[in-house]
Image (spheres, rainbow, N blue to C red):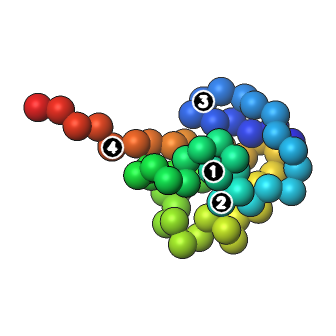
């Protein structure tokens, strides 16, 4: 399965949901916001979203600065 992650195409095993993808990529313990196909998605919905070819996922982490 090919996904677009933060603008870059990557290949993954089929049959992942969004939660499993984020866990495998090491994001589940981080404070992040996720947009799935252009729509910001609440964390409570991650497990319900089955990923398909050419889905787009944007992962944004908060930045601190001053």
Q: Are marks 1 and 2 in contact (CB under 8 Å)?
A: yes
Q: CA distance from mark 1 to mark 2?
A: 5 Å
Residue under pointer 1: 22
- Picture quadrant of residue 13: top right
Neighbours of disc 4 within 10 Å: few (<14), some (14-19), many (20+) = few
Going 18% across and 32% down the picture, which residue do you hit? 65
Q: Is residue 38 left or right of residue 12?
A: left
Mark 3 vs mark 1: in front: 1
Q: Position of residue 61 (x, y in %)?
A: 40, 42
Are discs 4 and 2 less than 8 Å apart at CB? no
Viewer-side label of 2, 3: 2
x, y (%) of residue 59? 51, 43
Which residue is label 4 attached to? 62
For mark 3, what is the residue? 7
Please give left or right for residue 35 compared with residue 10 in the image.
left
Q: Which residue is mark 2?
A: 19
Q: Marks 3 and 1, how far apart in space? A: 16 Å
């Amino acid at each position: 399965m090919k996904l677009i992650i933060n603008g870059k195409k990557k290949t993954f095993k089929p049959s992942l949901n969004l939660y499993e993808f984020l866990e495998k990529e090491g994001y589940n313990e981080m404070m992040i916001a996720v947009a799935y196909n252009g729509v910001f998605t609440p964390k409570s919905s991650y497990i319900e979203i089955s990923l398909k070819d050419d889905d787009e996922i944007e992962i944004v982490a908060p930045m601190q600065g001053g």
